[in-house]
Image (spheres, grey):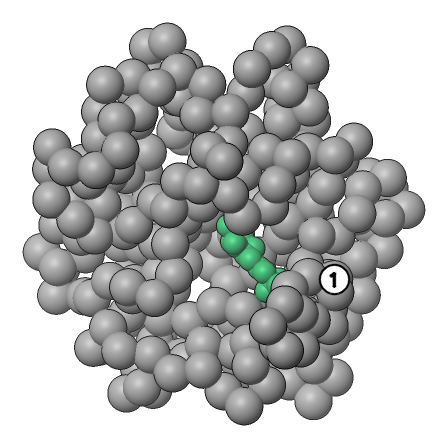
Amino acid sequence: MTARINNETDLAGMRAAGRAASSVLEMIGEHVQPGITTDELNQICHDYIVDELDCIPAPLNYGGGGGQMPFPKSICTSVNHVVCHGIPSPSKKLKNGDAINIDITVIKDGYHGDTSKMFFAGEASVMAKRLSKITQECMYKGIEQVRPGARLGDIGYAIQRHAENNHFSVVREFCGHGIAKVFHDDPQVLHYGRPGTGVVLEEGMSFTIEPMINAGKRQIKILPDQWTAVTKDHKLSAQWEHTLMVTADGFEIFTLRAEENFG
Ligand code: MF3
Ligand code: CO
Ligand code: CO
């Protein structure tokens, strides 16, 4: 089923879920410092999501179909060459210069808000900052395409063009997704493609745009933990994600943060 916002109840639900998810990213920023472990970040976010927001952390025990291990933690923490789905661990201590994507998905009254951004522990390299900035711009350029009548291929093309113009590459194995009452629904929102192709966007569709952009080659591999995706060449990867819907004249971002000059 394609995720759709059909009425005022759905709209209010998605706004509340999106606001809750974005508030976790606003809260966790000051904790991202050299010396903290990704498991400690997970614990802080978990407690905030459950105790302060009265939400459910959607990643916890997610998946597990087809013999896969369910995701064991409440957030994803993807450091440096980890592309996505990094599992928080007490043995992963951040060091000065590390770049980390923190991906938060909460369920509030049955609705999902899914968002991620890049943080740096201490002082990041010029390359890490550039990759992160271009990846955020890729997400915004994808979002700018969203309006009734546009095609999913327009989104993918805008993202791919900006990444490749900057000599970076687009990860193909993961995509944005429809989202509302279901975490990962149709449509699949590819972060590459050709303009004027693919599903035609209609008012009410809700989905994520979450490009993963690599500094080197686009190829990835999955570690034996069955979740952690890393770049094959061990070069840096970055990701940013928002949850949004198609409105009559464009888009509404449900997971926008106060710091953003967009949307
Ligand atoms: N939040 C991720 C996404 O953007 C999915 C994480 S699934 C998990 O779709 F199980 F790894 F947490
Ligand atoms: Co997502
Ligand atoms: Co996410």
Give the quarter of the image for residue 39.
bottom right
Look at label 1 and name its amino acid: Leu
Q: Residue furthest right?
A: 51
Q: Is residue 263 above or below residue 152?
A: above
Residue at point 32%, 33% (across, down): 143
Report if the beta carbon of the residue with label 1 is closer than 8 angstroms to ligand 1. Answer: yes
Q: Is residue 148 above or below residue 71?
A: above
Q: Residues within 10 Å of mark 1 (few under 14, many from 20)?
A: some
In this view of the protein, which residue sits in the foreground, 151 or 95? 151
Residue at point 75%, 57% (across, down): 45
| Side of 137 where 256 appears, left or right | right
In this view of the protein, which residue sits in the foreground, 127 or 60? 60
Q: Secondary structure at mark 1?
A: loop
Give residue 6's position: percent from left, percent from top.
56, 15
| Side of 253 where 73 appears, left or right | right
Residue marked by disc 1: 60
Quadrant occupied by the C terminus: top left
Instruction: Using the rendered image of the protein, determine whether residue 144 is visible from the camera's viewpoint.
Output: no
In this view of the protein, which residue sits in the foreground, 33 or 165? 165
Residue at point 66%, 70% (across, down): 64
| Side of 193 where 224 appears, left or right | right
Give residue 253's position: percent from left, percent from top.
48, 28
Q: Is residue 87 above or below residue 106?
A: below
Give residue 89's position: percent from left, percent from top.
70, 81
Q: Is residue 184 above or below residue 251?
A: below
